[in-house]
């Protein structure tokens, strides 16, 4: 328990001396008056939905909060997951407490921070926030047990384990996604294979071939000696113009050969994968089956203690399956035999152009925010301003967009500017700041007779969602409806604009409809802002939104209520 009373006298003397020396009047007591309201609690950190991502299994955080009361605070208690970690009952400023607690016992998982404040009259307030500590990477795919992005280090992100480096492998700045592993002579990486030895096995990665030397090992989990009845070996053989990718699997009593298929050399990035079950092993090149071979049972892992990446060495270096000087990126290993559909989903996540077929009539834009800011129909990445992030608490998929101060996304409007427009998305509000821009297609300057602006305004307990539409000669306001905050639930927001009306929907229900005198005027509207009104509608404090957003879709038509409700049902 923290006590502050013994410092009051000294503090007051210091304040008085400072005030006299600087021409400032002494503090004048105010008449207390009636005690009308309970204490007000503001938790400044962590916020609702905060994710703490550090490599250590236990983290420290600075808990920051403020309590104010109209008359006098009597008691403040802070608890972490139901256990009290701090208590205050003496206050220098009896109407205000600014708390700052260094708490060093945050483990992986979900947590709840609660502050309870009581005033002198016995009135009590409680405020809680939910947050998480997670490893920097959470598996994105079913069965994923190993992931190396090679972005400047050799760490496997799921177990937070650094590879053992043999020789001098390096990095290439021209990776498929970020940096990539760059092979070197007599160089490779090893890991313990303990967690990889399952009855089924799959590996998938991006590969930019260097055919010199003309044969090399890529991935090997093999016992000591020339024994191919145990473990597995994935390698290449060929010439300076063609390389064949092969797989050898040991099932204990025998070995299975899969002679795969070839790619032409030189070549750009190629997606390689293989899957092994108790009955078959399959090699895939760019998501397509290269060759299937029958297996006589599960892999026999006897004596297979390490995995080698970038070489067959040390245990499969014979037949010149030594170090590979090629580039590797986005290596993932699974404890199951992936289906072709699952494999193509992994490939699409790693940067391969993905064919997304619009699900709904009139859909022209779709951003799921699953670890990137790519619009899937055009396969175009949004431009990030500031440092927007991702939240693991998605409505659907692996991630959601997480707003940040002075941050948002910019996207060109070339496919969006028709006579009608609709937007739908899931939204988890953060009412701090108490107003923000969500979606803005606006010209430069304070001109609301062109484009559209969807935004929120309110306070800590209620937020109103509004829409402003420019039709050339005029602007039309739709004051929408409200959502109670804070809320842990996802809210579905939508708005539709035709040539005669604009409608705001909340959770599929009409919040408000407003008449329009004509179609949207898009003059000067060259880009759309997501997560802020900035840069062109940042006035009136419609700046960055710190909320979460997921499954954002735009349409070149005014959706009906039934169409919006169908989308909600599909995504729930």
Image (tube, helix red, strand yellow):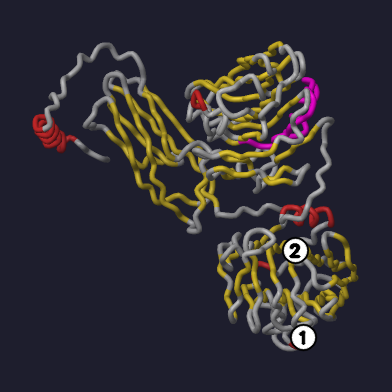
Vertical placement of 430 versus 29: above or below?
Answer: below
* For residue 72, above or below residue 242: above
Of circles 2 and 1, which is in front?
2
Residue 404 drawn above or below residue 457? below
Left or right, 263 with reference to 121: right
Q: Is residue 318 magenta?
A: no
Which quarter of the figure has residue 268?
bottom right
Residue at 64% over, 19% down: 449
Where in the figure is residue 55, as x and y percent of width and height? 50, 58
Mark with earlier residue (2, 1): 2
Label 1: element kind: loop
- The image shows residue 231 at horizontal and vertical percentages of 75, 76
x and y percent of residue 121 in the render?
A: 29, 18
Front-most of residues 523 and 513: 523
In the foreground, 340 or 192: 340
Instruction: Report which quarter residue 314 is drawn in.
Output: bottom right
321, 378: nearer the viewer: 378
Q: Which residue is mark 2?
A: 204
Quadrant that contains the C terminus: top right
Which residue does the numbered mark 1 point to in the structure image?
227
Q: Residue at x 59, y 34 (%)?
A: 531
Asked whether the viewer can see residue 232, the reply is: yes
Residue 159 point in image, percent of width and height: 58, 62
SS of the residue under disc 2 = strand
Residue 200 appears in the picture as rendered: no
For residue 468, which quarter of the picture?
Answer: top right
Above or below, 226 against 396 in this view is below
């Amino acid at each position: 328990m923290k006590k502050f009373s013994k410092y009051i006298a000294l503090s007051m003397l210091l304040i008085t001396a400072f005030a006299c020396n600087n021409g400032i009047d002494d503090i004048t007591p105010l008449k207390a008056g009636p005690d009308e309201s309970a204490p007000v609690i503001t938790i400044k950190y962590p916020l609702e939905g905060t994710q703490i991502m550090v490599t250590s299994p236990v983290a420290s955080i600075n808990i920051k909060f403020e309590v104010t009361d109209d008359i006098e605070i009597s008691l403040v208690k802070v608890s972490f997951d139901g256990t009290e970690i701090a208590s205050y009952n003496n206050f220098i400023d009896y109407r205000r407490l600014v708390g700052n607690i260094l708490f060093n016992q945050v483990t992986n998982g979900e947590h709840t921070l609660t502050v309870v404040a009581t005033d002198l009259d016995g009135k009590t307030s409680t405020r809680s926030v939910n947050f998480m500590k997670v490893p920097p990477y959470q598996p994105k795919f079913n069965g994923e047990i190993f992931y190396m992005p090679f972005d400047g280090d050799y760490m496997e992100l799921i177990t937070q384990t650094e590879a053992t480096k043999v020789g001098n492998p390096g990095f290439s700045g021209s990776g498929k996604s970020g940096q990539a592993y760059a092979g070197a002579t007599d160089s490779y990486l090893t890991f313990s294979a303990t967690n990889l030895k399952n009855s089924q096995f799959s590996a998938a990665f991006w590969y930019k071939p260097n055919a010199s030397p003309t044969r090399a090992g890529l991935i090997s989990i093999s016992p000591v000696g020339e024994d191919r009845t145990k473990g597995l070996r994935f390698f290449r053989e060929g010439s300076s113009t063609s390389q064949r990718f092969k797989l050898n699997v040991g099932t204990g009593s025998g070995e299975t050969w899969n002679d795969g298929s070839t790619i032409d050399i030189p070549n750009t990035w190629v997606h390689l994968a293989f899957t092994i079950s108790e009955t078959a092993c399959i090699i895939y090149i760019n998501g397509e089956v290269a060759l299937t071979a029958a297996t006589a049972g599960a892999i026999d892992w006897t004596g297979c203690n390490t995995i080698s990446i970038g070489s067959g060495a040390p245990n499969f270096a014979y037949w010149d399956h030594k170090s590979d000087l090629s580039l590797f990126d986005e290596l993932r290993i699974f404890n199951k035999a992936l289906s072709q559909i699952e494999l193509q989903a992994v490939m699409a996540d790693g940067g391969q152009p993905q064919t997304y077929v619009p699900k709904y009539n009139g859909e022209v834009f779709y951003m799921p925010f699953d670890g990137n800011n790519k619009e899937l129909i055009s396969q175009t990445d949004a431009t990030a301003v500031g440092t927007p992030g991702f939240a693991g608490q998605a409505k659907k998929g692996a991630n959601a967009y997480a707003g940040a101060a002075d941050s948002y996304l910019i996207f060109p409007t070339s496919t969006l500017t028709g006579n009608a427009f609709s937007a739908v998305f899931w939204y988890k509000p953060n009412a701090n700041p108490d107003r923000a821009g969500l979606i803005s297609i606006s010209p430069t300057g304070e001109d609301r007779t062109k484009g559209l602006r969807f935004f929120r305004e309110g306070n800590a307990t209620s937020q109103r969602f509004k829409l402003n539409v420019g039709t050339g000669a005029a602007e039309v306001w739709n004051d929408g409806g409200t959502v109670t905050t804070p809320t842990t639930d996802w809210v579905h927001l939508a708005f539709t604009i035709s040539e005669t009306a604009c409608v705001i929907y909340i959770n599929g229900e009409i919040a408000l409809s407003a008449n329009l005198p004509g179609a949207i005027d898009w003059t000067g509207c060259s880009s759309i802002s997501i997560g802020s009104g900035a840069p062109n509608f940042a006035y009136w404090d419609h700046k960055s939104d710190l909320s979460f957003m997921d499954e954002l879709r735009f349409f070149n038509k005014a959706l009906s209520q039934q169409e919006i409700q169908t989308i909600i049902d599909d995504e729930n």
